[in-house]
Amino acid sequence: MPEHNFKEVGEKMKKAVILFLSVILCVTLCSYASDQSQEDKMEPASSHEQNATASFESTPGFESKQSEATPASDEPETKEIAYPYEDTEGRVRHQLYINGELVETQHAPYTYPSKPKGAFYPIVEILENMDVECLFDEHLMTLTTKINGQIVTCNANNTDIVVGKVTLGGTAPEYIDGCFYVPSYTFMQLLDATVDFTSDRSGVTMTTDMVINPDTSGVEGLSISPEAITALGEQHYPGSAACSLCGGTGRSSCTACSGTGSVTQFSQNRSLVTGQMTIQSSRAFCSRCGGSGRTTCALCGGSGKR
């Protein structure tokens, strides 16, 4: 091959190698420039976000608003209700102590601010604590029971409270939120009790030495009106064959809710804004009767027969 042909081929190969290297270099530079451009675009955005966050956090009141919007992970412990306290109806509620021991009741005793010396006690729950049941009429306004042979009768519309052969006058019982309350002096006659307040007035007290005889106490032998029997349901046994408590229906008025089917519950809530504790009342189904207001008659076991 002529010499000039070798030179021509060499020149062409040289140019091809240079062109190939140039292409590779160009591609590398373009790729690097693209990555650098993306990083440059992302950095300012991150910087702006940091600046915006810093500016927002430096705004007065930011920390308090954030804490209000997002509850703290460590929630404050729920505090027990502090007695005495004023309920939503303006009554001052107290705890109940019987013979020096605190008694838990669904319905707390109360006084009125205008008459701080006269307390009202939930008679059904107190007697229930002594294993003594009470009986109501169909309107849930009249209560009767028996303590050691003494029949007790009282009505929410009458100031006369009859205990055996003694009639107490002065203040009428009150039927509030499904609970029958009687003035404290009722128990002075009924249970020969001494009633008073604790030294800090957080509770009301009742002290008695009376021993309850279950054979002569409760609702056995007591009867209710024909209207009340109708309200309790169908009569299975009529006349003398019928149970004296339920009138032959096998059902009796629930003593836990006084036949209303619901009870009052008190709850204490803390305000997220002020931090103050407030007490609220609400109605809930009675757990004993399931909201029906009626339970199986304790005297006849639900048979309706005497």
Image (cartoon, rainbow, N blue to C red):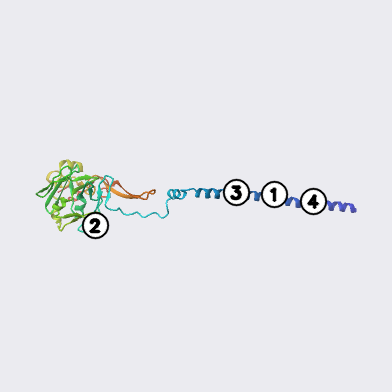
Residue nearer the viewer, 75 or 231 = 75
Mark 1–mark 2 distance (CA, rounded to whole Å) = 86 Å
Mark 1: secondary structure: helix
In the displayed structure, would residue 141 be above or below residue 81?
above
As drawn, the label of residue 16 is 4
Residue drawn at x 21%, y 45% is: 175
Spatial CA distance of label 4 from label 1 is: 21 Å
Q: Secondary structure at mark 4?
A: helix
Residue type pointed to by label 1 = Cys
- At label 2, the amino acid type is Leu
Q: Residue furthest left?
A: 165
Mark 4 and mark 2: span between their CA atoms? 104 Å
Residue 56 in sight here: yes
Give the spatial CA distance, label 3 vs label 1. Answer: 22 Å
Q: Look at mark 1 in the image and give the residue it sits on.
A: 30
Q: Quadrant of residue 210?
A: bottom left
Q: Nearer the viewer, mark 1 or mark 2?
A: 2
Front label number (2 vs 3): 3
Q: Name the residue tied to disc 3.
A: 44
Seen in the image, is 5 located left or right of residue 189? Answer: right
User: Which of disc 3 and disc 4 is earlier in sequence?
Assistant: 4
- Which is in the foreground here, disc 4 or disc 3? 3
Contact between marks 4 and 2 (CB within 8 A): the answer is no
Q: Are marks 1 and 2 in contact (CB under 8 Å)?
A: no
